[in-house]
Image (tube, helix red, strand yellow):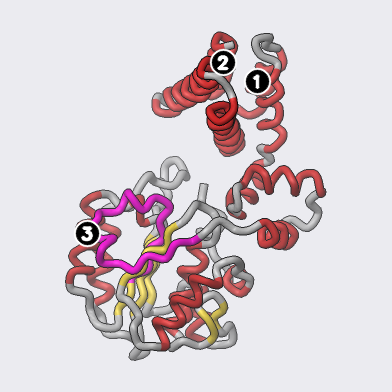
């Protein structure tokens, strides 16, 4: 699925929240004439890094009007940048597979090679040229090496802004040539405000559940809402809580509901939430309980991970994968 922030509208940048510290660092660098040629925006998925990157790019292209997290929306340069039509801005992100309609696993070297050619062009407006690489951790090794060559001898007035959720996936030589901005998860009040803005009819009960499950990621919260995965996740938990007794009829009913191809995103989100719950159970047990209980909880998490991952890699039937996973958990006890 495309991240909630991967497709931007001007309003997203106008309402960007929770990253004033990062914005202050960018603004200070820009106004002091010390703007770095390469930035790595790192943090968990779904907290607004890509939106910030676009806003930051618009801020630079406008000559520093407004703030990096609040560019001057009336400015024509900002408008073109936010619409991704500015001639001095290039967006690089994972492509969609034409056959499956699913995002490809990574960004290939052919895409990365566009960056060098673009940055060596003359600026159309006499200012910065900006490249934004969303999910740069998905650049394959050859693609990263192509970016590294540019970072080793960066053109004047050129800036590359990369968003990453896994900083360790980037080559150390790339990291060493970038200024790293660490983005924290969103605080509870910011999450509440964003949920109210994006899902105005959300009940108080569902709001609390989303706050607990999303870990400060508005993208994750909205993905749960979009896929309507909350009910399926809670049904998985109910089946798990009933172990070692397993209601097979109830399990098959759930699997029939979320296993069809049309519901693949719901299946993915619900199982991700379930796996995260099992992981947290193991962590909590390690803090409070004996070795035997910890081992069983770790086994529960590992077995479920392995069963679902094996089905995904082999493109096996999702219904069978879910049934097998719960049946395996029954054996753990």
164 magenta-colored: yes
Query: Is residue 49 placed above or below 310 in the rendered structure?
Result: below
Return the residue found at the far bottom.
126
Cα–Cα span, label 2 and label 1: 8 Å
Residue 140 x/y as whole percent: 27, 49
Query: Is residue 139 placed above or below 19 in the rendered structure?
Result: above
Query: Is residue 331 placed above or below 213 in the rendered structure?
Result: above
Give the mark, 2 or 1, whose residue is nearer the N terminus. Answer: 1
The residue singled out by tag 3 in the image is: 173
The one of 302 and 150 positioned closer to us in this rendering: 302
Question: In which image quadrant can residue 312 be found?
Answer: top left
Q: Do the residues bearing badges 2 and 1 touch, measured as CB atoms within 8 Å?
A: yes
The one of 264 and 177 positioned closer to us in this rendering: 177
SS at badge 3:
helix
Q: Residue at 49% x, 79% y: name it.
A: 80
User: As drawn, is 260 to the left or to the right of 87?
Assistant: right
Mark sitting on residue 137: none
Q: Residue at 28% x, 60% y: name it.
A: 175
Give the mark, 3 or 1, whose residue is nearer the N terminus. Answer: 3
The residue singled out by tag 2 in the image is: 329
The residue singled out by tag 1 in the image is: 240
Residue 196 x/y as whole percent: 75, 59
Q: Which residues are magenta?
A: 160-183
């Amino acid at each position: 699925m495309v991240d909630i922030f991967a497709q931007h509208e001007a309003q997203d940048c106008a309402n960007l929240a929770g990253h004033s510290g990062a914005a202050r660092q960018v603004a200070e660098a820009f106004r002091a004439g010390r703007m770095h040629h390469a930035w790595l925006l790192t943090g968990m998925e779904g907290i607004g890094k890509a939106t910030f990157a676009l806003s930051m790019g618009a801020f630079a292209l406008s000559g520093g009007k407004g703030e990096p997290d609040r560019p001057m929306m009336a400015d024509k340069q900002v408008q073109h940048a936010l619409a991704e039509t500015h001639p001095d801005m290039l967006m690089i992100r994972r492509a969609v597979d034409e056959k499956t309609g699913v995002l490809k696993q990574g960004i290939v070297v052919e895409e990365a090679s566009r960056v060098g050619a673009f940055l060596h062009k003359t600026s159309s407006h006499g200012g910065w040229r900006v490249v934004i690489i969303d999910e740069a951790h998905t650049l394959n090794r050859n693609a990263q090496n192509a970016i590294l060559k540019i970072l080793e001898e960066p053109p004047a007035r050129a800036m590359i802004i990369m968003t990453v959720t896994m900083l360790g996936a980037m080559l150390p030589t790339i990291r060493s040539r970038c200024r790293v901005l660490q983005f924290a998860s969103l605080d509870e009040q910011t999450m509440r405000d964003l949920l109210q803005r994006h899902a105005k009819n959300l009940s108080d009960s569902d709001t609390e559940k989303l706050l607990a499950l999303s870990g400060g990621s508005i993208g994750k919260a909205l993905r749960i809402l979009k896929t309507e995965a909350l009910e399926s996740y809670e049904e998985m938990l109910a089946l798990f809580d009933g172990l070692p007794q397993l209601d097979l009829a109830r399990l098959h009913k759930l699997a029939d509901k979320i296993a069809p191809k049309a519901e693949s995103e719901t299946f993915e989100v619900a199982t991700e939430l379930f796996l995260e719950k099992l992981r947290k159970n193991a962590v909590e047990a390690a803090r409070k309980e004996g070795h035997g209980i910890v081992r069983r909880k770790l086994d529960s998490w590992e077995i479920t991970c392995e069963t679902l991952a094996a089905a995904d890699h082999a493109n096996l039937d999702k219904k069978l994968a879910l049934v097998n996973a719960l049946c395996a958990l029954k054996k753990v006890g």
